[in-house]
Image (cartoon, rainbow, N blue to C red):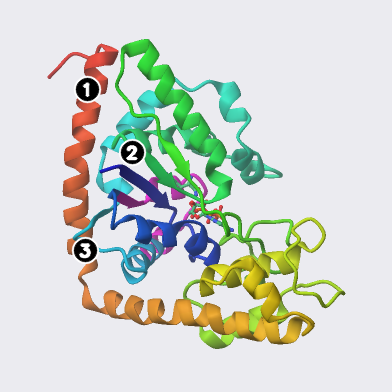
Amino acid sequence: MKRVLSGIQPSGQLTLGNYIGALKNFVEMQHSHECYYMVVDLHAITVPQEPAALREQTEAVSALYIASGLDPAKATIFLQSHVHQHAELGWMLTTLTYMGELERMTQFKDKSAGKESVGAGLFTYPSLMAADILLYNADLVPVGDDQKQHLELTRDLAHRFNQRFGDTFTIPEPYIPKVGARIMSLDDASKKMSKSNPNQGSFIAMLDDPAVIRKKISRAVTDSGREVKYDPQNKPEVSNLISIYANCSGKSVAEIEALYDGQGYGPFKKDLAEQVVAVLEPIQQRYHEIRKSGELYDILRQGAERAAEQAEKTVKTVKEKMGFLAR
Ligand code: ATP
Ligand code: LTN
């Protein structure tokens, strides 16, 4: 069975982009793969986090994992900070990463742009991400399109380690959805939908009330035309909404275009909102049950135990190969 690993940062409310680009695939893959899914809290602190907010968001993201359909009996679900081997291997891989490689990362450039002081962890973020993946010798990493560059660096680091110290790591492949790998902001189709955008209207949060979802979609920017047509070059806003529709409904782009042929944007947006609500409402109901039940802590404890077993094996091998003395 192929191994899968991925993670999401508890750095804010999860969006529909996180769901379509990543979480939905996590759920699908658990049936046919050996899966490890983390909440990457160590990554979240690469930008300042209030402790109380970090605690709340970490619990919320973990609960959303389960509410979205991840099954602790099938997948190993855990917090990155509960498995200390992530930080340990992260450090070792940082020493193998070149400054020039990190300087080229577009996520770093975006997140550091215009900031006066930027933590060094934001810069070395990709080496920790490589450790996350290589610790479990993952074959496949389900992520959105924006993570492709980080995956490429992970592959380079795995090669580099294998060449320098002997065959150790599996070279992982990204697993990126065909439609919906990059859901764009509702107010600006040139930017990806992001949980850290201060404009609430730019994203749909997975926990937004149905009434709020309907309002946000009705206000989503379109163009001055009236044709529901998938054409990302010339109609980026409408194409983005079609991608969301396709993902939430299971309909193809061609079916959606045919359905709204000659009808303008009104009916399309109205139905789109109902499709999104139909996906998110049941997840929200389960989410509230899980938060109330207190079962989360047991799930995370068991997940961390299972993950640590595998992670420790890898760290032991890596230390031997790099020349650290055994205890
Ligand atoms: P931020 O927007 O705060 O930088 P993020 O949501 O991009 O955060 P993560 O929470 O770590 O960052 O992302 C988790 C997963 O969701 C990643 O696999 C990422 O590629 C995917 N993802 C995030 N935004 C989108 C989007 N707009 N469309 C598709 N996938 C997305
Ligand atoms: N960098 C990712 C989050 C992340 C991740 C990982 C994804 C951290 N470690 C390991 C896949 C595998 C992000 O910002 N979206």
Q: Is residue 283 above or below residue 37?
A: below
Q: Which of 91 and 203 is in front in this view?
A: 203
Q: Residue at point 60% right, 82% down?
A: 273
Mark 3: which secondary structure?
Answer: helix
Q: Which residue is denoted by mark 3 in the rendering?
A: 297
Q: Earlier in the sequence, mark 3 or mark 1?
A: 3
Q: Which residue is denoted by mark 2 in the rendering?
A: 138
The question of residue 44 being in magenta is answered with yes
Q: Residue at point 74% right, 58% down?
A: 232
Q: Position of residue 44 (x, y in %)?
A: 45, 50
Label 3 CB sits under 8 Å from any ligand 1 atom? no
- The label nearer to you, 2 versus 1, is 2
- Looking at the rendering, the stretch of residues picked out in magenta corresponds to 36-56
254 to the left or right of 34:
right
The residue type indicated by label 1 comes to Thr
Q: How crowded is mark 2: few (under 14 residues within 10 Å), some or many (20 or more)?
A: many
The residue type indicated by label 3 comes to Tyr
Q: How crowded is mark 3: few (under 14 residues within 10 Å), some or many (20 or more)?
A: few
188 to the left or right of 81:
right
Label 2 CB sits under 8 Å from any ligand 2 atom? yes
Can residue 116 be seen in this snapshot? Answer: no
Q: Which residue is denoted by mark 1 in the rendering?
A: 317
The residue type indicated by label 2 comes to Ala
Can residue 68 be seen in this snapshot? Answer: yes
Quadrant position of the N terminus in the picture: top left
Q: Which of 262 and 85 is in front in this view?
A: 262
- Whether the residues at callouts 2 and 1 have beta carbons within 8 Å, the answer is no
Q: Residue at point 26% right, 15% down?
A: 321
